[in-house]
């Protein structure tokens, strides 16, 4: 957040009077009046005009359009992670339960920071970090800034999300918690699973999924694993038997899915190590395990003039077991003018999934069943050290610095898929007609970053701060995948074997008899791996202060020099494959904001800026990738380039009471070369890729309000309870522009082609929802610790991807959801306890991805998530 550095004792009594008034919250007006009177007694003043005493401190100290999610907000809504909490912020929506869209713009147009430092991503399809990795227990709060200031990175299309970890406490505490929960369509119902390993419940593989020594030795040769000059029949049999573990691919039906479970704790303390210097620490650790079953429909259709022809139509069922371990440790040394902190965050998140689908595959010409087992293990480790130092008699000079090393990892060992053909009512696996695979993959992402910011309060009559700084960020990623299949290569399988249970068919005996033979099918050209890098060097200069009475302004410019490259390489030889030249760009990004505090509790903000958005690594890598959520096939496009944005914002803010406000704003964005996903087809294979559309615009308005109400009459039964109402609404409209002479450069085309073959002129921007609304209705009591909040959220339909040429777009309809959160404090012997209950999706809103035209519909991916509920108990010691 762009803000003035902390100011020490003012240099005149007039400054002291004004500073004291501005810093006075509404609940301390009486003591503030006494302090002001004391100053007035010492110095005769002609007149003092004070504005802004009712405006909350964060809003006073920023000239930007920003929203602040506090720890109290996180507790009120009971959100388990940052992604869930941000659905309550005006103009924000969450896709895939982890990626945040700001004002309808996709995750590529927003950046996420942790204590001001960039983060790596363990996701193979995104460079943006998924915010579901950050549990609310480790967060002090979240800042969402929607207008750009030069202090932030230039990748700022929709906004920046700055997650703040818990700080060093002022006094010691210890808190323990335990909880359980479930889901209406999962808990106690039938579901799918597979055995895996003994430690799967904790989310850690016990070694069961490690590559066998025989397979590792074969891969170390740098040759494709297949019968030939490098591997004889005995070798292939031995390797095949070594990776044949039925515990990892045999689907099982679980008659009653277990309830969710969680436990955790947090502790902190501080001590004075010498006069005026405090040493403190905070530690948080939590574990959670939950099950979720999805049942729904997957279809691939082709619209003609009169009807829909289905390439395939499946009913599916999947059960996910998600286990998460998170821990954070922070330590700090704080003096009167200097502070140094260290923060270490560890998140380990694992999804174990078993799924099956069955239906008509009209392209294959028969009824098919596909069974899958998957294990996705994500780890994020972030270590950061930072400091703040103030110098001078009046703390006129402030120096802030930070350095961080973060590493994210995603392992997907033993992804398996096995297909069956329905033959006269029996499921047959004839390996010469239907496929199977075993995949191993890994993504490693690392970011090393650092920066320094210096602010100098100028010796001028009016308050002005000149600030500047420099930063760097090195993001390196490596990704690879190997695929193997058991094929009937020496003739068709005998009739009896085709109907064997899959663990019998893949038995060591059948492999030893060459009924099935192992073959590596990694990448047609060996290009199943890539390295990627993004190096950014930046510097900025900014002037901020009061230009005339009651008007503050900030003017800044940021210079960024960046090199981004994706280097595919042959996974067998390690040799790089020819790829486009790196994107080497430098930018001057200006930003200006003005805040007019025209009344005691009202102000008006205006901002204008230029920012950028870069393509993500996986979008640039020309390789195949399958999304396990919806079985969609992806190819990157190495022809992508950066997008550039011009941003305009206007917002009115009225703070009419303690914690009460009303804000309303307008925004307009012009985007050059926005990146959009498109679906295409080649050789009967449907896949999704990416292109730079020529241009787009987004504009809209947003409204946000919060108000407390007391009963008009006093009643003993009501006590000090008060009603709470908060809501926000964002309307936005977007338009993609593609003229007659505009071109795009899709993957697979040697030269650019007319844009209108892939982009619809005048269509809605991908990922943008016209309506986003939130409403919270609650009751709370300060004395009893009771809170009950009903939380409604509505997001209108949006485009997920452009349809194939001549076909309708892929749409998503998030719809309306309703949640209930109840918290009650109570005394437990001589301790303080809190009982919390949450219920999510009370309206049982379905997840819907579809194509539609002329009243005809294709359900691309739809399912019923059910109602989720949880109850937890925490005790403070």
Image: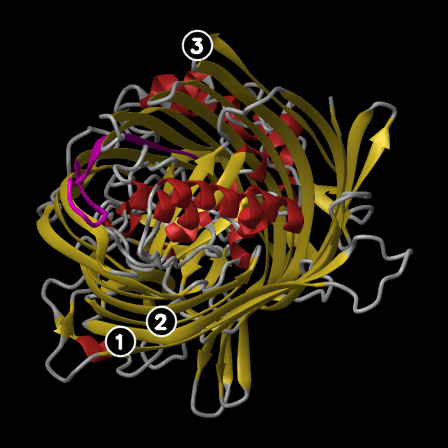
Left or right, residue 686 beside residue 166: left
In this picture the colour scheme is: secondary structure
User: What percent of the width, then of the height, locates residue 433?
Assistant: 49, 53
- Residues in magenta, as a range: 440-469
Circle 2 sits on which residue?
802
Which residue was labeled with disc 1? 759
Q: Residues within 10 Å of mark 3 (few under 14, many from 20)?
A: few
- Using the image, determine if residue 472 lies above or below residue 236: below
**In the drawing, what numbered circle is on residue 275?**
3
Mark 3–mark 2 contact, CB under 8 Å?
no
Q: In the rendered image, which quarter is residue 547 located in?
A: bottom left
> Distance from label 1 to label 2 (Cα)?
8 Å
Q: Tell me whether the residue at label 1 lies in contact with that at label 3, contact meaning CB atoms closer than 8 angstroms.
A: no
* Earlier residue among tags 1 and 3: 3
Query: How far, Cα to Cα, is label 1 from label 3?
Result: 67 Å
Query: Which SS does the magenta portion mostly show?
Result: strand
Residue 147 seen from this side: yes
Is residue 462 one of those drawn in magenta? yes
Q: Position of residue 448 (x, y in %)?
A: 26, 28
Q: How far is the residue under mark 3 from the one under mark 2?
A: 64 Å
- Horizontal relation, residue 488 to residue 148: left or right: right
């Amino acid at each position: 957040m762009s803000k003035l550095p902390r100011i020490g004792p003012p240099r005149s009594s007039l400054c002291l009077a004004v500073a004291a008034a501005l810093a006075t919250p509404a609940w301390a007006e009486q003591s503030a009046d006494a302090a002001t009177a004391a100053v007035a007694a010492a110095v005769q003043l002609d007149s003092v005009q004070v504005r802004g005493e009712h405006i909350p401190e964060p809003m006073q100290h920023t000239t930007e359009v920003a929203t602040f999610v506090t720890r109290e907000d996180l507790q009120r809504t009971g959100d388990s992670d940052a992604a869930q909490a941000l659905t309550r912020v005006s103009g924000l929506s969450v896709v895939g339960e982890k990626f945040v869209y700001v004002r309808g713009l996709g995750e590529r147009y927003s950046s996420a920071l942790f204590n001001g430092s960039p983060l790596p991503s363990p996701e193979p399809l995104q460079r943006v970090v998924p915010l579901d990795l950050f549990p609310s227990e480790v967060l002090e709060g979240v800042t969402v800034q929607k207008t750009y200031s030069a202090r932030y990175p230039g990748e700022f299309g929709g906004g920046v999300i700055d997650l703040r970890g818990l700080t060093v406490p002022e006094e010691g505490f210890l808190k323990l918690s335990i909880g359980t929960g479930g889901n209406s369509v999962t808990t106690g119902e039938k579901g799918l699973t597979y055995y895996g390993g003994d430690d799967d419940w904790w989310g850690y593989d016990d070694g069961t999924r490690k590559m066998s020594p025989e397979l590792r030795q074969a891969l170390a040769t740098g040759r494709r694993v297949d019968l030939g000059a490098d591997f004889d029949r005995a070798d292939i049999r031995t390797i095949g038997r070594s990776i044949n573990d039925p515990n990892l691919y045999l689907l099982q039906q679980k008659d009653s899915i277990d309830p969710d479970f969680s436990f955790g704790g947090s502790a902190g303390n501080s001590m004075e190590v010498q006069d005026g210097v405090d040493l403190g620490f905070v530690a948080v650790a939590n574990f959670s395990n939950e099950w979720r079953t999805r049942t729904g429909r997957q279809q691939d259709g082709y619209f003609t003039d009169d009807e829909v022809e289905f390439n395939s139509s499946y009913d599916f069922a999947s059960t996910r077991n998600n286990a998460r371990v998170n821990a954070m440790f922070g330590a700090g040394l704080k003096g009167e003018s200097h502070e140094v902190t260290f923060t270490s965050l560890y998140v380990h998140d694992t999804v174990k999934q078993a799924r099956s689908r069955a239906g008509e595959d009209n392209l294959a010409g028969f009824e098919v069943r596909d069974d899958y087992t998957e294990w996705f293990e994500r780890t994020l480790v972030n270590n950061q050290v930072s400091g703040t130092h103030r110098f001078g008699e009046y703390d006129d000079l402030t120096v802030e610095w930070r350095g961080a090393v973060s590493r994210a990892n995603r392992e997907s060992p033993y992804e398996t898929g096995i297909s069956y053909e329905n033959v006269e009512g029996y499921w047959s696996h004839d390996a010469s007609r239907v496929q199977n695979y075993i995949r191993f993959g890994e993504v490693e992402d690392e970011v090393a970053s650092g920066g320094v910011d210096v602010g100098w309060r100028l010796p001028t009559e009016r308050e002005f701060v000149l600030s500047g700084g420099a930063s760097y960020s090195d993001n390196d990623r490596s990704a690879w995948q190997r695929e193997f299949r058991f094929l009937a290569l020496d003739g068709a399988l005998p009739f009896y074997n085709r109907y064997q249970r899959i663990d019998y068919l893949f038995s060591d005996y059948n492999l030893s008899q060459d009924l099935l033979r192992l073959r590596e099918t990694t990448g047609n050209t060996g290009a199943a791996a890539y390295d990627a890098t993004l190096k950014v060097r930046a510097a900025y200069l900014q002037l901020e202060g009061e230009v005339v009475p009651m008007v503050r302004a900030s003017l800044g410019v940021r210079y960024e020099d960046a090199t981004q490259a994706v280097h595919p390489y042959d996974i067998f030889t390690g040799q790089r494959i020819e790829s486009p030249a790196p994107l080497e760009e430098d930018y001057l990004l200006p930003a200006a904001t003005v805040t007019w505090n025209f009344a005691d509790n009202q102000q008006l903000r205006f901002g204008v800026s230029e920012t950028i958005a870069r393509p993500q690594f996986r979008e640039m890598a020309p390789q195949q990738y399958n999304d396990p959520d919806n079985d969609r096939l992806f190819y990157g496009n190495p022809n992508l380039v950066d997008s550039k944005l011009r941003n305009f914002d206007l917002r009115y803010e009225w703070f009419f009471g303690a914690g009460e406000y009303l804000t309303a704003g307008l925004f307009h964005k012009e985007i050059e070369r926005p990146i959009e996903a498109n679906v295409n087809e080649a050789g009967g294979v449907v896949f999704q890729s990416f292109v730079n559309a020529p241009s787009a615009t987004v504009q809209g308005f947003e409204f946000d309000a919060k108000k407390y109400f007391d009963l008009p009459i006093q009643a003993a039964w009501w006590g000090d309870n008060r009603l709470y109402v908060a809501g926000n609404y964002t309307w936005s409209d977007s338009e993609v522009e593609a003229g007659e002479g505009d071109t795009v450069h899709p993957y697979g085309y040697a030269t650019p082609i007319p844009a209108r073959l892939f982009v619809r002129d005048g269509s809605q921007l991908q990922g943008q929802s016209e309506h986003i609304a939130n409403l919270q209705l609650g009751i709370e009591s300060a004395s009893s610790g009771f809170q009950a909040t009903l939380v409604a959220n509505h997001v209108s339909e949006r485009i997920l991807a452009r349809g194939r040429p001549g076909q309708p777009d892929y749409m998503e309809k998030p719809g309306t959801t309703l949640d209930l959160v109840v918290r009650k404090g109570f005394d437990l012997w001589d301790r303080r306890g809190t009982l919390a209950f949450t219920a999510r999706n009370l309206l049982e809103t379905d997840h819907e991805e579809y194509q539609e035209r002329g009243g005809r519909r294709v359900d691309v991916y739809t399912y019923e998530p059910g109602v989720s509920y949880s109850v937890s108990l925490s005790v403070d010691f």
